[in-house]
Amino acid sequence: MNQKKITIAILALLFLQMSTQGIVPALAVIKENFNYLGYDTIQLLVTIPNIFLIISSMLVGTLAVYLSQEKIALVGVIILTISGILPIWMNSFFMIVCMRALIGLGSGVISTTTISLISRYYEEETKEKMLGVQSTFICGGGIVFSLLGGIMAARNWRYAFGVYAIGLVVFFIVASFLPHTLPSRKKASSKNVHISLSVVGYFVAFFLYGTSYNILLGNLARFLSEESIGDTASAGLAMSLSMFGGAATGVLFQWISKMFKGYVLPAGYLLSALGLLLLGTASSLAGVLPGCTLLGVGMSIIMPAMLSQMTEITRPEQPAFLIGISLAIYNIGSFSSPYIVNSIMNRFEGYGIQGRFLFGALLMVLTSVAFIIHKITQSDTAIVKKGVSV
């Protein structure tokens, strides 16, 4: 077994995990082509993959009975690549949405299988290093897909979908480098799962974060276009900076976690709130670019910190199942975002798209405050218990 080849294959799979954001910079020009549709409908191209990411976790559990992990990974890459490229030749918006749904399915299969592969091929010490590199390569893929998607969409909106040809390279790497294994032949079980009130609180936080972060994905290209701040290439650059901020933060996460100690989550939410505040008040790219970067930094703090903290308050046998639920809830929040945010903001005239960014900033601040209160309450309870025991 060649560990270096396995590592290259896994890193290649990680590179595809944020590929669903590849057409975010192109949304404004796609809207121009389908001008008879509302922007809420156009945003389905970004939100619909999130629902099928949820379905994919169940699909992987079923496939694992019949297929080995490397074959499941290849199935995910095939689905993502073919459904990603096909919209180049499609004129029906409905068919393009169907292809985007399949991209979500393929991305979810890849994501779920990659976690299993890391657990299978790495010992505890090397596993921690691999998990640290994970967010860097995921964000690195996001940078490439967003930047190329924006540049290609500047020529023609259809060309933005050509970026998914990268999947062909990943397919070759995975097929060549991952060793052949046997299917598990066992179905996963979710019996005896206990969900505490604290875990429910994290579920709510995941939903609100998905709702808030997706405001960026669904509205960035439209905002730049309508305010004449930039084009699709500018949107691609902004999304790439967001991913770059996430990648850099992923490398430094352990140091950041130690620096903020128990308040790392509130810090992540406040940085994200600041990013959305910059977008909500920006009148040029000088405000947009740092705002997007801060949102990427915030995401690479919030997601691993929430998953880590949640596993600490659950039973030893539960984390994998509850993490799956948490990510599903995050994706539901992302899918629901346009409908929730637009229905609320439509009641307030005069705020426009930037009002949506400000609303997201408010949600981030409120969630940060909730985590601060929770932390202080936990500390007070621990002090009381210590005093009683003395």
Image (spheres, grey):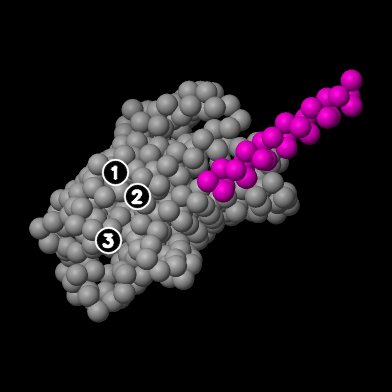
Badge 3 amino acid: Arg
| Residue farthest along the front direction in this orientation | 350
- Residue in view at x 16 percent, y 69 percent: 89
SS category of the residue bearing label 3:
helix
Rate crowding at label 1 as few (under 14), some (14 to 19) or many (20 or more) other CA atoms within 10 Å.
some
Q: Position of residue 210 (x, y in %)?
A: 48, 54
Q: Which mark is residue 222?
A: 3
Comes first in the chain, label 2 or label 1: 2
Q: Which mark is residue 281?
A: 2
Badge 1 amino acid: Gly
User: In the shown orientation, is residue 2 left or right of residue 382?
Assistant: left
Say which residue label 1 marks: 287
Q: Which residues are magenta?
A: 365-390
Marks 2/1: CA–CA distance? 8 Å
SS category of the residue bearing label 2:
helix
Rate crowding at label 2 as few (under 14), some (14 to 19) or many (20 or more) other CA atoms within 10 Å.
some
- Residue in view at x 58 percent, y 32 percent: 263
Badge 2 amino acid: Thr
